Image (tube, rainbow, N blue to C red):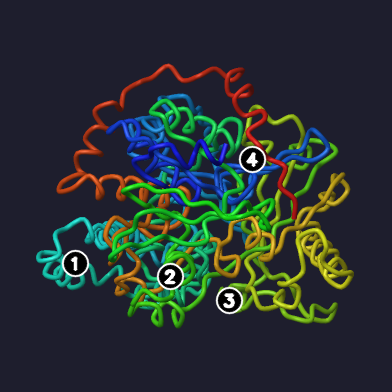
Amino acid sequence: MGTTLRSAKFDAIVIGSGIGGLTVAALLAKLHHKRVLVLEQHFTVGGFTHGFSRKGKFHWDVGLHYVGDMGSGSTGRAVFDFLTDGQLAWQAMPNPFEKFVYPDFTFEVSTNPQHYQADLIQQFPQEARAIRRYFRDVEQGAFWFGAHTMMDLLPDWFASIARLGVRYLGAIARQTTQQYLDRHFRDPRLKALLASQWSDYGLPPSQSCFGVHSLIVTHYLRGGWYPVGGGPAIAAAIAPVIERAGGKIILQQRVTEILLESGTAVGVRVENAAHPEQESEIYRAPLIISDAGSVNTYLKLIPASYPLPVRQQIQNFPKGSSALTVYLGLKDSPQILGFQGENHWIYATYDHDRVAQGMPFPLTSNVPWPEFVYLSFPSLKDSLAQGHTAEIIALVGYEPFTRWRQQAWRHRDQDYQQLKAHITQALIDFVEAHYPGFATLIEYAELSTPLTVEHFDASDRGSIYGIPCIPARLDQSWVSAKTPIKNLYLTGSDAFSLGIMGAMMGGVKTAGLVMGPLGFFKTMAAIMKEAKPVAHRSIQTVAQQSQGAGDYYSP
């Protein structure tokens, strides 16, 4: 296979099969008939949209928990339908779709933004005026954050002028979320409540820019959706679009170097991830697109001999957060405890900064941890689920796990295993304290740590959101789809924004950018032109295509 691939002619090479990589590959294939080679270092396709199974009945997604903006007629739905030829079905979450649980009250989030606003005003009537303003301001913040991310679509001579205008007019997006909340609200409980979704972007309000907070809030104003068949159904539906144009998606191919000739990207050097002792191979194409993130691309894949002034800036930039996830297989439906498929954000404190400090280390019984978890029920969101499942997630830093970084996956020592067992029990106990009877439902439990994420995703320090969305991110030239190297581009979350939708739109932006002036707008016009009611595939077809999508992932 290697010899055949080496001799094959590809129009582009995409490094990584996350949603950003798959999106740009599918758009180049569908709109421009490009033959694209997608190289994935994992043994399954999809990046954070892939999933895994245990005991033949429990299935979980590792990164996709819900997606907003998927209602009929929405831009997000139009893009997904275009990428998949309408062969991906979506299931709406219940109403309410979120519950924010605090020490002395629980707030349910409606899928209707007017109802959401009214419910806030009913609970905090003294802040009614500020609440109404907040709903207007998050629309503005999201707009200006989006406008900033589009600056690299402009010609260089005009982009610098446009950035000054966006910086001035979009100042609301550049302040921290906490600065905004402190300026407009008095009640500390309301401030905490409005920031409840901060782990959707990985930063507490004191660190995040209000623009990314606004982007997430507006993204979910009309509820959440889940792909029928789970995350793997996304890659299963996009892959045929790439392959019909003569493209290939090859697994367990780890790119170790982007090849440059006279300052131009011309190919990649690849090692077999399953057998790294084998001789590396070289694949060439006139276009190289990296879905490996800014850190990996600039610090690891571009040869160190190539002069890049931004390297030091990237090394010094704050690091992203990672996560702990307990994957739970349940004996019975969680509906017997009253759960309907909504997300639960459970806080033991109103102090989000304290929560963001993460897991204390060493973890001892006399230290209060955890103080927050996100509780999700994949099986209640997917009509094809065969077994009942839940996930408990807590954000965490990388540092407590560095001791085991050099130990091989599945071969880490007893101390690591004991720490995992301790963490697993602590997270389960935290949920049990809020929902008695939850622990008795558990049949199977398995924990992933930042080392798991780092191993399978190859992300920097197990970061799950790419470059952190602090205000300073908006001033970094290297957070862009463009690179200073000819014929080399970035895609995914570092090219646009975080999350499944942000990374996907990063792929749309990159696909448009490589096609020349106005390429993005032409791409979006083609997508929206095709946006119409389509005959989505049946549930049975979803099941058939999702099976065997490659998903035995193990922490």
What amino acid type should be assigned to the residue bearing mark 1? Answer: Val
Q: Position of residue 86 (x, y in %)?
A: 42, 25
Contact between marks 1 and 3 (CB within 8 A): the answer is no
Q: Residues within 10 Å of mark 3 (few under 14, many from 20)?
A: some
**Disc 4 element:** loop
Residue 73: quadrant of the picture: top left
Q: In the image, 218: left or right of 5? A: left
Q: Quadrant of residue 474?
A: bottom left
Q: Residues within 10 Å of mark 4 (few under 14, many from 20)?
A: many
The one nearer the camera, 344 or 106, is 344
Please state which of residues 404 and 376 is positioned toward the viewer in this rendering: 404
Residue 510 spot, x, y in % from top left: 31, 50
Of the image marks 2 and 3, the number of the one nearer the N terminus:
2
Indicate which disc residue 351 carries.
3
Kindly state the secondary structure of the residue where label 3 is placed.
loop
Judged from the image, the secondary structure of the residue bearing numbered disc 1 is helix
Going from N to C along the chain, the mark reached first, 4 or 1, is: 1
Among numbered discs 4 and 2, the one appearing first in the sequence? 2
| In this view, the mark in front (4 or 1) | 1
Q: In this view, does 129 lie to the left or right of 323?
A: left
| Residue under the point 52% across and 34% down | 92
Q: Distance between the residues labelled 2 and 3?
A: 43 Å
Q: Could you tell me the amino acid type at mark 3?
A: Asp
The amino acid type, in three-letter code, at marker 2 is Pro
Residue position marked by numbered label 2 in the rendering: 303
| Residue at numbered disc 1 | 166
Mark 1 to mark 3 CA distance (whole Å): 32 Å
Residue type at numbered disc 4: Gly
* Distance Cα–Cα, label 1 vs label 2: 34 Å
**From the viewer's perspective, is residue 553 above or below residue 178?**
above
